[in-house]
Amino acid sequence: MNVQLFEGERVRLAPHDPDKDAEVESRWTHDPEYMRLVSADPVRPLSPGQIKKKYEEAGKEKEKSQNRFSFAVRTRADDRLIGLVRLDRIEWNNGAGWLALGIGAAEDRGQGYGTEALRLILRYAFDELNLHRLSASTFEYNTGALRFLERAGFAVEVRRRQAIQREGRRWDDLFLGILREDWERLAGGR
Amino acid sequence: MNTSLFHGQLVRLAAPNPETDAEALSRWQRDAEFLRLLDSDAARPLPVAQNKTDMEAIVARENSFAFMIRTLADDRVIGFIGLGRPQWTHGDAWLGIGLGDREYWGKGCGTDAMRVMLRFAFTELNLHRVSLGVFEYNPRAVRSYEKAGFVLEGRTRQDVRRDGRYWDSLWMGILREEWERQNPKSQDSRSKARTAG
């Protein structure tokens, strides 16, 4: 059994290192276009110190509930932080959880890094955590994420009408889902 | 005409009182079916002290609007209802309701409480939409939500596992414009209130 859960071809899923990563993550929060793709919260830049504090709080939360698995996405070539991926709100009794993934800098997008990271986290969710299904949410205007998730086997399941207000108009909030059987069909040899 | 924001035809929404309501909550939690209809957590009854602490935390949270449902006829506490997780910038919040007292199931009390809560959501919180989740195995709730004006927006497949099989979660929403179309009367009473001042 050759188990390589964290190493992709060009990226790896690695633990967070807030001391090292906070600077880079802070930079991402200064890019409103990126922040609006990944979150419904009001955009606002965070300092490296605020980022570190967020990690401390998430750590405490994790100790309490054990329903969150969060990773840094790093390049294997130079161990550079390029994104974040996490599974959270896991309901163990139902085998269900939520996926979130972001590649922070515009120049790192469209390079296939996200696709690799997604392949790794799906395998982690279904082969290590033994979940039955995953959900993900994205906004109507994020057509890139929509295509990206559908290519990996996700299907749009819910369209929450007009749930997002941005740039003076209303957009739908979409929930997507993938079942273990969808993933097994697509990922056969893993 | 409704003169109070918190009164319906059958029930009213009242402030939770952890001192006394925690006991009612513990009583309702002996009913596993009630718990399974309420949320997707593993059903388990909690001691009164725990419910009291949890209720106090909810009451203290400024960003959630939680009420007990009391009958107008005899002021009996029969359940709870609330709006939480508001996204203020987008005008969206999540509604949750539980009727713990089985005697009052299927008598219109839940639908009545929903109507009061929606009026609060749209005329006091000024939301743009209200959202909720419900399970495939709870058709009575789905019917009640539809009666209150909610529209089915989709289903997450095989989201909940109960008694050895998977069930879908259903997601519903109501938009301000839909609610206003269905409630022209409260529009009238609002403009009257304005001119009366």
Image (spheres, rainbow, N blue to C red):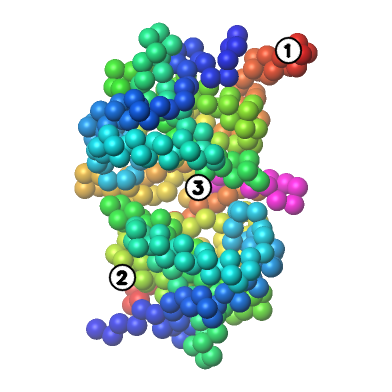
Cα–Cα span, label 2 and label 3:
26 Å
Secondary structure beneath dot 3 equals strand
Cα–Cα span, label 1 and label 3:
39 Å
Amino acid tagged 1: Lys
Q: Nearer the viewer, residue A73 or B78?
A: B78
Chain name for mark 2: A
Dot 2 corresponds to which residue? A127
Amino acid tagged 3: Val
- Give the crowd class for mark 2: few <14, some 14-19, many >=20 residues within 10 Å: few
Residue range highlighted in magenta: A159-170
Principal SS element in the magenta part?
A: strand
Q: Which mark is residue B192?
A: 1
Earlier residue among tags 2 and 3: 2
Residue plotted at (44% across, 38% down):
B58
Q: Looking at the rendering, which quadrant does residue A23 occupy?
A: bottom right
Secondary structure beneath dot 1 equals helix
